Structure formats: structure tokens, C-alpha cells
Image: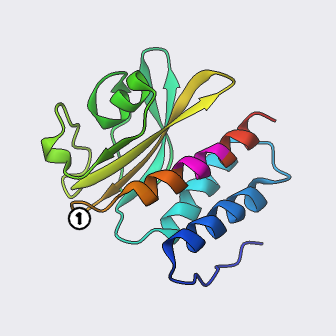
Amino acid sequence: MFETTAYSGSREKDYELLVKQLDALLTGEEDEIAHLANASALLNQFLDDVNWVGFYLHKGDELILGPFQGLPACVRIKIGKGVCGTAVAENKTQLVADVHQFPGHIACDAASQSEIVVPIIVNGKSYGVLDIDSPSKNRFDETDQKYLEQFVAVLVKHLTK
């Protein structure tokens, strides 16, 4: 059973606890969809000032909507298009302070103002991305990037079992 944790208020310590929580939450379960669903729910519960948290899975030349928390979203995104497709094409986290300044941004939710997208690589191949949107500009920074990349690394550990 999952119990909500009281966080300390220190972003770094709270993120470290979040990463440990994810590891514990996924341990003992093998199903990938269950992993992605619980990971998105955990992030949605932990992060403030976000309006969408979820995954897009790489299939062929596009990303397909996976488990998420938030409003209904775009179902398919071509690799190289928008923030998510760019993260896959460049195999690099995209930290976007203002989505309206990102060339080719795909607006699935008009309320989104900033975004972070972390690529997920499993066994040397693109698996998909973790995508998080905020209704505030400049919501995400290098601290978020560091710990969300660690979060994805723990997720990958469980996806490769």
C-alpha cells in the first residue's frame, strides 16, 4: 500500500526521497504499464504547479501516448517534432522555459507554458520520454532536470528486468 510522504521542503532532499520512493514502489512488479502508471501518479502527487505528467512510447517513427496524469493529450507525435519528438531525435533532455518560444511546439494543452522532457533509453534503444508540463513559465530548472533524469534511470532499471 502506498502512503503519502511528508516532504522536508528542501528540493534536493525531497527529490532524493522521491527517487527512493519510485524504486520501492516498482520493486516486485514486472508489468511495464503498471510501472509507467505508478511513476506518473507519483510524480503528479510530488510536483507542484504542473498540469500534465506522463509518458510517450517510441514506436516506429513516432511517439504514442502512454500512461499519464492530466487532461486528454495528443496521441501521436512524430520523432523530431515538438519538444517530445526533439528529445528523442537529440537523445537529450529538453528544458523549455517558455513553450511558445520553442520552434514547432505542439500545443496539446493551451494552458501549458513550460515543459521538461526526459528521454528514456532501455538496452541502448529509445523507449520513449517522460513529459511534464506546467501552466507557469520557467517552472523547471537544472535541479528538476538532474533529479528527473535520476527518476528515469530508476524507472529504466525496472523496465529492463
**What residue is shown with label 1?**
136
Q: Is residue 92 left or right of residue 140?
A: right
Please, what secondary structure does the residue beneath circle 1 have? loop
Residue 42 image position (x, y, % from top left): 58, 63
Vertical placement of residue 35 versus 48, above or below:
above
Classify the position of the C terminus by image quarter.
top right
Work out whether residue 114 or residue 75 is closer to the camera in this orientation and state it. Answer: 114
Vertical placement of residue 53 versus 20, above or below:
above
Tally the marks: 1
| Residue closest to the far top | 60
Work out whether residue 67 or residue 102 is closer to the camera in this orientation and state it. Answer: 102
Q: Is residue 112 magenta?
A: no
Q: Is residue 108 left or right of residue 148?
A: left
**Residue found 18% across the figure and 38% down from its top:** 102
Residue 32: in sight, yes or no? yes
Question: Which corner quadrant of the image does residue 19 belong to?
Answer: bottom right
What are the residue bounds of the magenta stretch?
149-153
Say what amino acid the circle numbered 1 marks. Ser
Residue 158 image position (x, y, % from top left): 75, 43
**Residue found 65% across the figure and 69% down from its top:** 17
Residue 4 image position (x, y, % from top left): 64, 79
